[in-house]
Image (cartoon, helix red, strand yellow):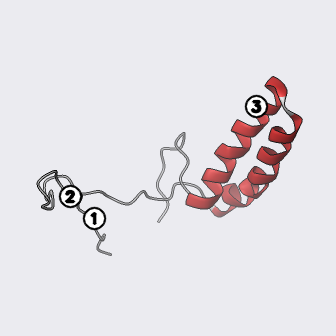
Amino acid sequence: MTEVLNYPMTHQGVRDLDHPIRPRRRNSGVEERSGSTLGPVRAEFGMRRGGLYGLLLGVLGGFLAYRWITGHCPAGSKTIR
């Protein structure tokens, strides 16, 4: 399968063909992503709670929501196609 590459614009208004923007690859499996579905709920609960504990819950919930939506985990190294 061929990747579709996106090329950013330079300051002069032309495409920079030397530095393509590559799409991120998924590295989270179905089980991991389904476990992350509670991320938005956890983030909202943390924001409503407030304080340091609420902040930590909000950050954790935001990370889980990111992983659920994109399928990419920054801590993971494997690639799933």
In three-dimensional space, the C-alpha distance between marks 1 and 2, rounded to whole angstroms, equals 10 Å
* Residue at the extreme top: 52
Q: Is residue 57 above or below residue 18?
A: above
Q: Is residue 43 above or below residue 79?
A: above
Identify the element where label 2 is drawn. Answer: loop
Q: Which residue in the protein does label 2 denote? A: 9
Q: Residue at x 30, y 71 (%)?
A: 4
Q: Residue at x 75, y 55 (%)?
A: 35
Identified by mark 1, the residue type is: Asn
Q: Position of residue 15 (x, y in %)?
A: 15, 61
Of circles 1 and 2, which is in front?
A: 2
Identify the element where label 3 is drawn. Answer: helix
Q: Residues within 10 Å of mark 3 (few under 14, many from 20)?
A: some
Identified by mark 3, the residue type is: Leu
Q: Which residue in the protein does label 1 denote? A: 6
In three-dimensional space, the C-alpha distance between marks 3 and 1, rounded to whole angstroms, equals 36 Å
Q: Position of residue 25 (x, y in %)?
A: 44, 58
- Mark nearer the N terminus (3 vs 1): 1
Q: Residues within 10 Å of mark 2 (few under 14, many from 20)?
A: few
Q: Is residue 7 left or right of residue 39?
A: left
Q: Residue at x 80, y 40 (%)?
A: 47
Quadrant of the drawing holding the N terminus? bottom left
Q: Which residue in the protein does label 3 denote? A: 55
